[in-house]
Image (cartoon, rainbow, N blue to C red):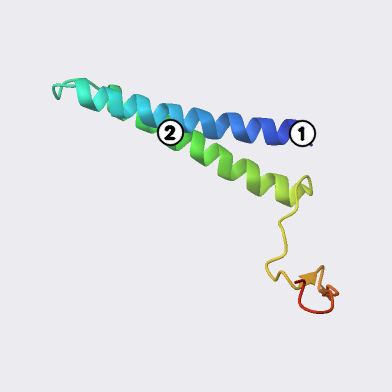
Amino acid sequence: MWWLKVLILLLVAAAVVSLFRGLAALMRSDGRDKGTARALTWRVVFSAAVFLLLVVSTWMGWIAPHDVNPTLRDGVPIEQPAGGGE
């Protein structure tokens, strides 16, 4: 699912761009501009979309999380090389 990875990367990039647009609006604002709030609202929307996309993708089986324990793969111990891999 290469398109899913591209979509997630685009959404994360859009969130970062929106974050910096909010910073720029904050720096040039004199207190009457709503650009900062608008940019940060979009950042929250993009971030929520990434989160929901990851949850739905995991639920649908499009992506699978990695195992937490590095000595197990799918609950089965991984054979370690003799000598500790040195």
Picture coordinates of residue 61, whole percent (x, y): 79, 49
72 to 35, vertically: above or below: below
Picture coordinates of residue 73, whole percent (x, y): 81, 68
Q: Which residue sits at x=29%, y=22%?
A: 35
Query: Of the residues tagged 1 and 2, which is closer to the observer?
Result: 1
Q: Which residue sits at x=59%, y=43%?
A: 52
For residue 43, side relative to residue 71 (left or right): left
Q: Which residue sits at x=82%, y=75%?
A: 80
Residue neighbourhood size for the residue with mark 1, other residues' Cα within 10 Å, grouped as few (<14), some (14–19), many (≥20): few
15 to 34, vertically: above or below: below
Q: Could you tell me the amino acid type at mark 2? A: Arg
For residue 60, side relative to residue 25 (left or right): right
Give the residue pinned by disc 2: 43
Residue closest to the far bottom:
83
Q: Could you tell me the amino acid type at mark 1? A: Trp
Picture coordinates of residue 71, whole percent (x, y): 75, 73
Quadrant housing residue 19? top left
Q: Which residue sits at x=68%, y=31%?
A: 6
Label 1 or label 2, whichever comes before in sequence order:
1
Q: Nearer the viewer, residue 43 or 6?
A: 6
Residue closest to the far left:
30
Mark 1 secondary-structure assignment:
helix
Q: Which mark is residue 2?
A: 1
Residue neighbourhood size for the residue with mark 2, other residues' Cα within 10 Å, grouped as few (<14), some (14–19), many (≥20): many
Quadrant for the N terminus in the image: top right
Mark 2 secondary-structure assignment:
helix
